[in-house]
Amino acid sequence: MFLLLKAVFALAATLGLFGMGVWAARRWGPKNLFASMRPSTDRRLAIVESLQLDPSRRLLLVRVDTQERLVLLGEGQVLEPTPAGRASERAA
């Protein structure tokens, strides 16, 4: 019983010291210490929408600066979607 109580107090002391260290780093540490956790507002690349076509393929609408592009992902690679003009030329 004494060993269990000793282990619980040791765990509580360790977690308490760790929590105080994190609190001190946030309170007095440099401003950039946790900056990577905050979302940036000046990103140039964003996924606007994602559509799962089947279990192995996904269609993404990606915004780059002011342009939007369709990207077809599948089987661990980026697949080139066939433009509509070329598909109609092959059918003729």
Image (cartoon, helix red, strand yellow):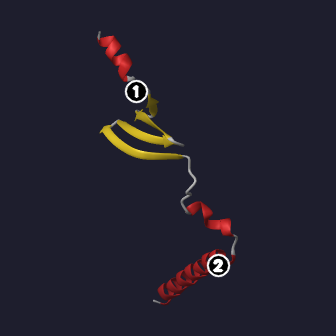
Q: Is residue 48 above or below residue 12?
A: above
Circles 2 and 1: CB distance less than 8 Å?
no
> Toward the viewer: 17 or 8?
17
- Residue 8 position within the rendered picture, expressed as x and y whole percent measured from the top left: 50, 84
- Name the mark nearer the viewer: 2 or 1: 1
Q: Within 10 Å of the Cα at label 2, are there few (<14), some (14-19), or many (20+) other Cα atoms?
A: few
First in residue order: circle 2 vs circle 1: 2
Question: Please, what secondary structure does the residue beneath circle 2 have?
Answer: helix
> Toward the viewer: 55 or 62?
62
Q: Amino acid at mark 1?
A: Pro
Extreme residue in the bottom direction? 2
Q: Which residue is mark 2?
A: 27
Q: CA distance from mark 2 to mark 1?
A: 50 Å
Q: Amino acid at mark 2?
A: Arg
> Toward the viewer: 10 or 19?
19
Residue 81 has which mark?
Answer: 1
Q: Quadrant of residue 37?
A: bottom right
Q: Is residue 24 above or below residue 90?
A: below
Extreme residue in the front direction? 66
Residue 12 has which mark?
Answer: none
Residue at (56, 57) in percent of width and height: 40
Left-right relation of 7 to 35: left
Q: Is residue 56 above or below residue 3?
A: above
